[in-house]
Structures are given as structure tokens and as C-alpha cells.
Image (cartoon, coloured by chain):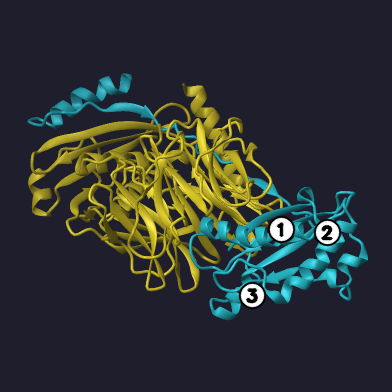
Amino acid sequence: MNKLLLIAPLLALVLSGCPSTPIKEAPVEDRKSDVTTVKVGDATVTGLPLELTDSKSVLSKRIIYFDLDKYDIKDEYKELVAAHAKFLVANRPFKMLIQGHTDERGSREYNLSLGQKRAEAVKRNLILLGAKEEQVEAVSFGKEKPAAEGHNEAAWAQNRRAHMLYKSPAGSGEF
Amino acid sequence: MKKLIYALCFFSFLSASAAQAQLLTIEIAGTGANRIPVAVADFGGDPALARTLVNVVRSDLEISGQFKLIPNDATMTESSAVDFREFKERGADAVVAGSLVASTQNNLEARYRLYDINKRAVLSGAAYVATAGQLRLAGHRIADDVYEKLTGERGVFSTRIAYVTKSNGRFQLQIADADGQNAQAALVSKEPIISPVWSPDGSRIAYVSFENKKPILYLHTLASGQRTTLANFKGSNSAPAWSPDGHRLAIVLTKDGHSQVYGINADGSGLQRLSNSSGIDTEPRYSPDGAHIYFTSDRGGSPQIYRMSANGGDVQRITFEGSYNVTPRPSPDGKSLAFISRRDGNFQLAVMDLANRQVTVLTDSHKDESPSFAPNGRMILIATEIGGRGVLSSVSIDGKIKQRLSIASGDVREPAWGPFAK
């Protein structure tokens, strides 16, 4: 504050004829400019029975593809969904997470809701075939995790899909 | 007060060394028609530090697209005599002069005065106390004041932006100054991060992270890195929006089988369903007065923007033109609404004047997303795509001024412009 008192008369001299605005002192500290970095890791996949992971088993097939703007299970995937429903019925302590996906066009959040519709369609089918509500969770990744990175119909068709992930009774598995 | 300054400087030093954010570069793609001619003199004091300070002021004013910088390399302090006639001859309407002087032990004082050349008057002046590490912020503060005195609107140079980068399979939530400098990573993840939104006080960010194989909502305190789970209900948890008072958030949950809008307290209590349709309701945003929530819904057959009361109910359709209007973002004064509109297969930024419902498309790009208003309502930050890469673009509300922000390699997306510093 002392400095201000000192410079004020000087300025008054220099700026003769000018209405002098006093200089106000303010610290530049009132913004919290520090940001702490947080890192989050990813889980490893272990502990599922061979029946679910062996490439010879139908249950190792976990992806269902959808048509453009469509959210129902195509006939060609009904058998696969039925096989997974059968496994869930026979193995009640197992849980499944269904992740729905969309192609890259449009709003991220709206696509999240559209991917949800695909995951819910798979979930409804599984429940109709005997899986229990508490065994199955439907979620969406929207357009965030494309399987194919291209920007054409071939890539988009690869991306309109739902993934089925399993977790064993011990809590290990794919999610 | 001084102790507080020192403490904050210490922390910013610590986190600066920990940060590994990628540099965001800015490029001016268009300027306003009537730019105000301003001369920013070289400031007195330590030449290197003064140059850093002055460069920030000049760059801020230049980047804003609203000023034309009159070249000026003469040193002029806040107490130098001003040759008004000479500046007038050189076409300047205003002149900034100042100096950087040692104040207390570790602090500098950035002093300046802003002169109106035509009126031969002092318009403004101040002295900001800063450490060498805070010089850029002091420069932004000076530029904010110059901007406000000359345009009549508050400047946003000292505000911050948040955005997500995707590079080498890693996602980072980054916080940077409004000019893209000083970027620091708040969150680093192998899984996507979307929909960041600033708390009204600027201390926290709510976002969706997929780090646990599903979309979960987190609240993240920037200074400490402390995270709390805002919502992790069965199904997807997404699309957060703060109420203007910062107590509540509108969010989207699928626990009842499809995306619907809910309200929740910032501490995770008080969940209440707000929207009620058999289709998709998502992307909620409070009006600035807190009375309404704008949202996207496909209840009419195609995604369109609707508005309901903040407690749910009283639903009104807002957009009618076209078959895809999404991501509503009301302006800070509540008078207009930015959103993304699909036209001939292209996703473009549009603004609606809410008084007469007139819509103006502001861009000619093809993949615009996630608009976010500057807190003074003058610019809108969007994510878009250029040459197959995700970049940020800020567009003035008349569409004339455009700037582009990109990183050297990788995508930038999901911008969120922070609030004014309190």
C-alpha cells in the first residue's frame, strides 16, 4: 500500500489533464490453479471356465451385431443368445455384463442411450429365456469404444454391437 | 493473505512438475469485422519477465478476434507520459502501458494503466501481485480488464477449460487456461472419459468414466485429486449437469431400463426421477435461473430438444426443424440455446434465439459435438473433426470469429468451459 501512496502523486504529475484512476492492488492468488493428476488402471481377466473361453465352445462367441438404427436381435443371433441364457440358467451364481455400442455418428450421450437400447434388448431376451434379473446388467459404451476405427459403413457395421462379459461366482472374470 | 499466496505457489509448483499434459496449440481462423485498435506497449521492469507478461496480454487480445494490435515496441510504464496525438496518428483507440516491479520477497507487482486515446483519459489501472510462475495469470487478468473496459463485457482470458484427449490409447481429462496453455492432467485412464462439467464454483468437475467396464459418474476435486462416486446405479450413469447453485445435479440413469433424467444431490443423496417417457431422455442442462431443464428426447420419433420444469413435468418441445437436434446448452444469460443439428448428414453447431425460436447455423463443419458457452456468452467451444482428427474450435455467437485448438498427435474432445474466477 505504501508504494501506491508514492506513485499516486507521480502519476498525477504525468497525467496532467487526465482524470487519474487509482491503481488498485489485487493479488493474483484467488484461483486454484493447481491440479492433481489421478491415474486409474484396468483389471486383468482370469478365472472363467473353459466352457466360456474355449474358442471351440459356442459360448466363447460374445458379440451380437445390429443393423443401422435397429435395436432388436437379428434372427441369426437368436441361437447364440439362447445358448448364453441356457448357461446363465444352469449357472445361477454367474453374472453377465452386456455392453452396448453404436457407430460414431452423432452426440456422445445420445449414442450412449442408443447403445443402452441394444444392451437392454439382449438382456430382455436372456431374461425371457430364464436368466435372472440379478444375473444380468445392461450398460452402454455409446460410440466410445469402436471395434473398427474407419469412417465408412463397413466400420460402422462392426461397431453397432453388444458384448457379453462374464464374472464367476468368485468375483473374477471379464468385468 | 501472504501465507496463502505462498502456499498456493508451492502447490502449483508441485503439480506442474507432475503434469504431463500435451500442449494445446491455438490457431485463429477468423476475426470480427470491427476490431478495436489497441497498442500494448512493452512494459518496464525486468525485460524477460515483462515480455512474458506483455506477450500474454497481446496474445489474449489478438486471439479474441475483437482487437487489432497496433505494433508498439517502445517501453512505456504506467507512469510514462502518453503522447496521445502520436497514438491517434497510428490509429490506436486505446493504449496499455505498465511495468513489472519487485514487490515483496518472492512476488512481483504487475502494474498497468489503460488509456482512451480519443478522450485522452485513463480508463483503468491496477496492480496485480504475482510470483514469476503466476505471470501468465496476471497477464490474463490485465487482458480481462482491457477487454471489459473496451467491449463492455467481462473477459474470459483468466478462466479455464476442461477437455479430454485421446492419444496412444490413453484418455486424459485435462485442465488448461482458456488459451490452451498450462494444461494439466486431472485424470489419466485407459478407458474413455466423457461429459465433463464444471461445478459453478470451479473447484470440481463431474464426468463419466468407463474405468470400471461401465459408465459411472464421479465428482473430482481438481486441487486435491479427490474423487467420489456421484452415481453408480445398475445400468449406465451419465450426462451430468450442475444446478446453478451447485447443490444438485441432473443426471441420466438407465436403472429402469432406458435413459431417463434424474436429480441427485452432489453428495449422492436425494435421488429423484425427473423425466418420464417410454423413450430416451438424456443430455439435461439447467437454465441459468435454475427453473428449467433442457434435454434431448426421442419421444416424438426423432431426437429433439425439449424443456421441462426443474422438478420434472410441464414438458415443452423446443426444436422442430430437421430430424436430429441434440445436446442443448443454454447461454449464460438464458436467452439463447446452442445445440447440434444434423443437416444433410452433417452435424453442425446451431444457436436458437429463445425469444423468437429463430435458428442460426454457425459452422460449416460435419462432425460438431458438445458445445460449451464461455461464461460471458460471447464464444462457444465445440469439439469437431478436421482431417480425421478431433480438435476443439471456439466460435463467436455471430459465427464470425473462429479459433481452433489442437494437440500435436491424438484427438481432443469433450470441451467444457469453466466459470468466471470468483
Residue occupying the point 52% across, 54% down: B280
Residue B152 is tagged as none
Label 1, on which residue? Answer: A123
Give the colour in which the image draws chain A: cyan
Q: Nearer the viewer, mark 2 or mark 1?
A: 1
Residue occupying the point 30% across, 62% down: B362
Q: Where is residue B291 in the image (x, y as percent from the top left)?
A: 38, 35
Query: From the viewer's perspective, is B186 left or right of B377?
Result: right
Quick check: can you spot residue B60? Answer: no
The answer to whether the residues at label 2 and label 1 have Cβ atoms under 8 Å apart is: no
Q: Which chain carries label 3?
A: A
Between A69 and B266, which is closer to the camera in this rendering? A69
- Residue B266 found in image quarter: top right
Mark 1 or mark 3: name the one nearer the start of the chain. Answer: 1
Q: Mark 2 lies on which chain?
A: A
Residue A45 is tagged as 2
Label 3, on which residue? Answer: A158
Three-letter residue code for mark 1: Lys
Decide: few, some or many residues near mark 1? Use Cα within 10 Å; few <14, some 14-19, many ≥20: many
Residue occupying the point 31% across, 55% down: B351
Three-letter residue code for mark 3: Gln
Secondary structure, mark 3, is helix
Between B251 and B15, which is closer to the camera in this rendering? B251
Tell me how far mark 1 sits from mark 3, CA to CA. 20 Å
